[in-house]
Image (spheres, rainbow, N blue to C red):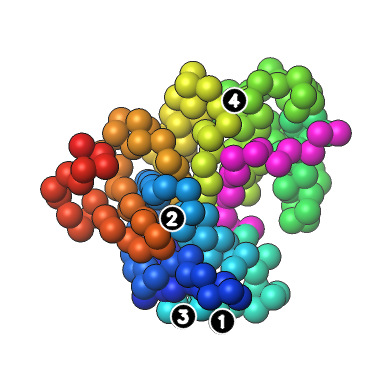
């Protein structure tokens, strides 16, 4: 589903964000991207959804090839990806239901299908009773669940989550993480960038650690525990 083949990313001033990164994510897999701030986690995600292009190497996502993807193809790729951010990015003047429905409206879903599809994912994330609440009436954990519902409403085969628990307290973090695990159990591949090693230690999910733009550990390839997670 996702393949990085000797990918490097450098910016205009010569600063390298990624150096010779290679890995694959299989269908239905749950993968943690870990590493300190600035290690390259967000750059990896941006390459996956086409916000950035690699300086060298190949990125393949759901049959699309970057950097060869065209401007017309990028929206087609993103419609097949669910993307969740740390800062929720909800529309403050729309209810939870309307925020989720907006993702369907902009992709020109059949209008008659929107209410049922929205209701389904709101129930899935445990917020059926909060559909008519505005973002400022919801807790941080509830707002993130709305953001996840918005990402899920297009039934993507891959969900990307960039520090989705970074702004949440411990209880909300546990709830959102369990929701992501449940989504993964339903067959959706999840790639979650996080610096929260407590979450990583709770599971046996695959972990890819980045350091200064390089992959220094991939649990799919190594069995010995590294110092950072011991």
| Element assignment for label 3 | strand
**Disc 3 from disc 2: Cα separation:** 18 Å
**Disc 4 from disc 1: Cα separation:** 38 Å
| Element assignment for label 2 | loop
Residue occupying image coordinates x 66% and y 21%: 139
Residues packed near mark 4 inside 10 Å, few (<14), some (14 to 19) or many (20 plus): many
**Disc 4 from disc 3: Cα separation:** 38 Å
**Disc 2 from disc 1: Cα separation:** 25 Å
Q: The magenta stretch spans which residues?
A: 79-93
Image x and y of residue 172, in percent:
52, 22
Q: Quadrant of the N terminus?
A: bottom left
In the picture of the structure, the residue carrying the numbered disc 2 is: 39
Residue occupying image coordinates x 58% and y 31%: 167
Q: Is residue 117 visible?
A: no
Q: Nearer the viewer, mark 2 or mark 4?
A: 2
| Element assignment for label 4 | helix
In the picture of the structure, the residue carrying the numbered disc 1 is: 68
First in sequence: mark 3 or mark 2?
2
Left or right of 32: which side holds 48?
Answer: right
Q: Is residue 10 visible?
A: yes
Image x and y of residue 221, in percent:
20, 58
Residue occupying image coordinates x 59% and y 40%: 86
In the picture of the structure, the residue carrying the numbered disc 4 is: 141
Quick check: marks 2 and 4 in contact, CB under 8 Å?
A: no
Is most of the magenta stretch helix, strand or loop?
loop
Q: Nearer the viewer, mark 4 or mark 3?
A: 3
Asked if 180 appears above or below 171 in the picture, the reply is: below
Asked if 5 appears above or below 92 in the picture, the reply is: below
Left or right of 97: which side holds 44?
Answer: left
First in sequence: mark 2 or mark 4?
2
């Amino acid at each position: 589903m996702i393949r990085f083949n000797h990918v490097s990313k450098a910016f205009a001033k010569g600063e390298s964000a990624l150096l010779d990164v290679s890995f694959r994510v299989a269908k239905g897999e749950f993968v943690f991207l870990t590493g300190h701030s600035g290690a390259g986690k967000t750059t990896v995600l941006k390459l996956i959804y086409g916000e950035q292009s690699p300086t060298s190497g190949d990125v393949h996502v759901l049959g699309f090839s970057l950097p060869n993807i065209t401007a017309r193809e990028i929206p087609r790729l993103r419609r097949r990806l669910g993307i969740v951010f740390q800062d929720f990015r909800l529309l403050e003047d729309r209810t939870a239901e309307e925020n989720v429905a907006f993702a369907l409206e902009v992709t020109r879903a059949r209008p008659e299908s929107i209410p049922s599809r929205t209701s389904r994912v709101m129930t899935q994330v445990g917020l059926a009773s909060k559909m008519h609440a505005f973002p400022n009436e919801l807790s941080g954990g509830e707002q993130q669940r709305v953001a996840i519902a918005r990402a899920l409403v297009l039934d993507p085969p891959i969900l990307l989550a960039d520090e989705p628990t970074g702004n949440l307290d411990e209880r909300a973090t546990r709830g959102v993480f369990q929701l992501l695990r449940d989504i993964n159990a339903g067959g959706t591949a999840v790639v979650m960038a996080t610096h929260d090693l407590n979450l990583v230690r709770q599971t046996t999910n695959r972990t890819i650690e980045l350091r200064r733009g390089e992959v220094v550990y991939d649990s799919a390839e190594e069995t010995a525990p590294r110092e950072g997670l011991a």
